[in-house]
Image (cartoon, rainbow, N blue to C red):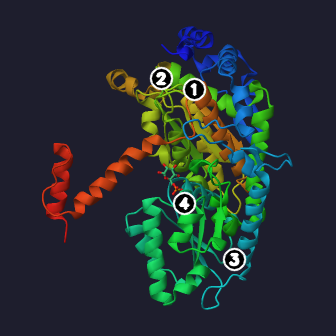
Amino acid sequence: MSTLTQSPAWKALEDHYQAIKGASMRDMFANDPHRFEKFSIESGGLFFDFSKNRVTEETMRLLFELARQSGLQERINNMFSGEKINITEKRAVLHSALRNLDKNPIMVDGEDVMPKVNAVKEKIGEFSDKVRSGEWLGYTGKAITDIVNIGIGGSDLGPLMVCQALKQYGHARITMHFVSTVDGDQIVSTLKDLNPETTLFIVASKTFTTQETITNAKTARKWFVAHSGDEKAIAKHFVAVSTNAKAVAEFGIDTENMFEFWDWVGGRYSLWSAIGLPIAIYLGKHNYQDLLHGAYTMDQHFQGKPFEQNLPVIMGLLGVWYINFFGAKTHLVSPYNQCLYRFPAYLQQLDMESNGKTVDLNGNRVDYATGPVVWGDTGINGQHAYYQLLHQGSQLVPIDFIATIEHPEIPEPHNTILMANFFAQTEAFMRGKNEAEVRAELDKMGISGEAQEALVPHKIFEGNRPTNTILMQRLTPRRLGALIALYEHKIFVQGTVWNINSYDQWGVELGKQLARAIEGDLTTPGLTTGHDASTNGLINYYKRNAPR
Ligand SMILES: O=P(O)(O)OC[C@H]1O[C@H](O)[C@H](O)[C@@H](O)[C@@H]1O
């Protein structure tokens, strides 16, 4: 038994869960006219309503107690002050330093990191100005029209998601492309439509050893040299973003054209670093700065607000409540804004790579559930696909509903219909439809007797399904920055309660290791015998049938 599950706060929550697990949110709303005001807060331009959750004031009190017992405030302070809280990699976790707008120093190994953070930011600003203004010229003297970001995981998902989310701020002349997979289809189809004279490649890799990225970058370089006929022209068309200057130089990119970041920036937390270069070029340095500003505002809120008014703390604890006490296995993110359609994919890496762990900070296997499976798509599309399961299926799936009030340049009635659905769904999940309501509806439709009896059980909605609602005025760089930082800190809160290291990712290594060995098998003629029967059989089937 772990100290967490034996702790007084945990035990109190277990007892409390038994007492309220059957309680209905409908009744909670009926019994408390102030429930909405009590369970909603606003920060960083984000309005957060958590009243449609299966919680009472007592639940929240016990959850805050759990956070206190976990030493959350101290852990927050440790992270922001540069302590090496990523203990397995012996690294600080300082994505917050990248958006630190205070003038205060942040020390890592006795060195203030802020001067070098600011110097790189400056360099990003200058470079993005040059590309945007047309001053940065390709090898035939033409301005850049297309940017190809080559990167994967954290070196892809963040910039991709932000550029799509804020595309209305994008530069008119510049088209963004993102290439991540080693499946050559993506790089080949991207290059097919590009003009090498006006294309800039950003090779983005924290380690600069990631096989997918290096393979794609080599293919891009080959394509570029084949067209330009001049190796020297590479300097005008390839830049790198990395922590590994040596590997960048070895690849053939001048380190003058390299934008640096540091090992205390986790890959999935890196869009605030030079990994955000495509964002700065596409949106301009002021909008990029605004994105950082939004995140900074959330950082301030997270560090300074009491838990009772602290948005990431509340959001994280609600997740713990469902995962550890209700047994929820997944968490759905449902944005009602097409621009946010890659936000769930971005959050998948952020959350699942952070909290998909079963060993605690002391090296012991945990005896409680940790990070959920995070999934999602835009809410409207989800309604017509998987919401059936959410409304009437056997699993409890907590959902985050996210929407913006204004959608500039979208003609009515689009927004009204979108928002009506947004509000209707959270209402439906909470209220459900009981038997009496179903019968009354069928009576009205003239369906009675046996026909009614046959239909009633199928048309009942149990309801009582929890949702959070996040509303913002408009999807601006500041609001998006705050939203991303909100989720980053939510994940931190949960990792703290679960006493796991949210900042390493050893789980991605085994597959990479085995792939390197299998690469050798695939290129060696003859039968492969070194694996289990299934893996051998599959490899040999592939070898028999692969075109030579
Ligand atoms: O930026 P890179 O070093 O190329 O890494 C890209 C990605 O690959 C790894 O496998 C990790 O799981 C991710 O956390 C990382 O973001």
Q: Amino acid at mark 1?
A: Asn
Q: Amino acid at mark 2?
A: Val
- Please state the horizontal and vertical placement of residue 369, each as a whole percent of the image: 48, 25
Check disc 2 and report its element: helix, strand or loop. Answer: loop
Q: Amino acid at mark 3?
A: Val
Q: Amino acid at mark 4?
A: Ser
Q: State left or right for residue 121 relative to residue 355.
A: right
Q: Which numbered circle lies on residue 499?
A: 1
Mark 4, ligand 1, within 8 Å: the answer is yes
Are the residues flagged by discs 3 and 2 in contact, CB closer than 8 Å?
A: no
Check disc 1 and report its element: helix, strand or loop. Answer: loop
- Please state the horizontal and vertical placement of residue 86, each as a whole percent of the image: 60, 38
Tell me if residue 147 comes above or below residue 415 in the rendering.
below
Name the residue located 45 percent from the left edge and 46 percent from the top edge. Answer: 384
Camera-nearest residue between 370 and 252 = 252
Are the residues flagged by discs 4 and 2 in contact, CB closer than 8 Å?
A: no
Q: Nearer the viewer, mark 4 or mark 3?
A: 4
Of callouts 4 and 1, the N-terminal one? 4
Q: State left or right for residue 282 relative to residue 464.
A: right
Name the residue located 44 percent from the left edge and 70 percent from the top edge. Answer: 187
- Residue under pointer 2: 366
- Residue under pointer 4: 205
Q: State left or right for residue 426 relative to residue 180.
A: right
Are the residues flagged by discs 2 and 1 in contact, CB closer than 8 Å?
A: yes
* Distance of label 4 from label 3 (alpha carbons): 21 Å
Of callouts 3 and 2, the N-terminal one? 3
Of callouts 1 and 3, the N-terminal one? 3
Check disc 3 and report its element: helix, strand or loop. Answer: helix
Check disc 4 and report its element: helix, strand or loop. Answer: loop
Q: Which numbered circle lies on residue 464?
A: none
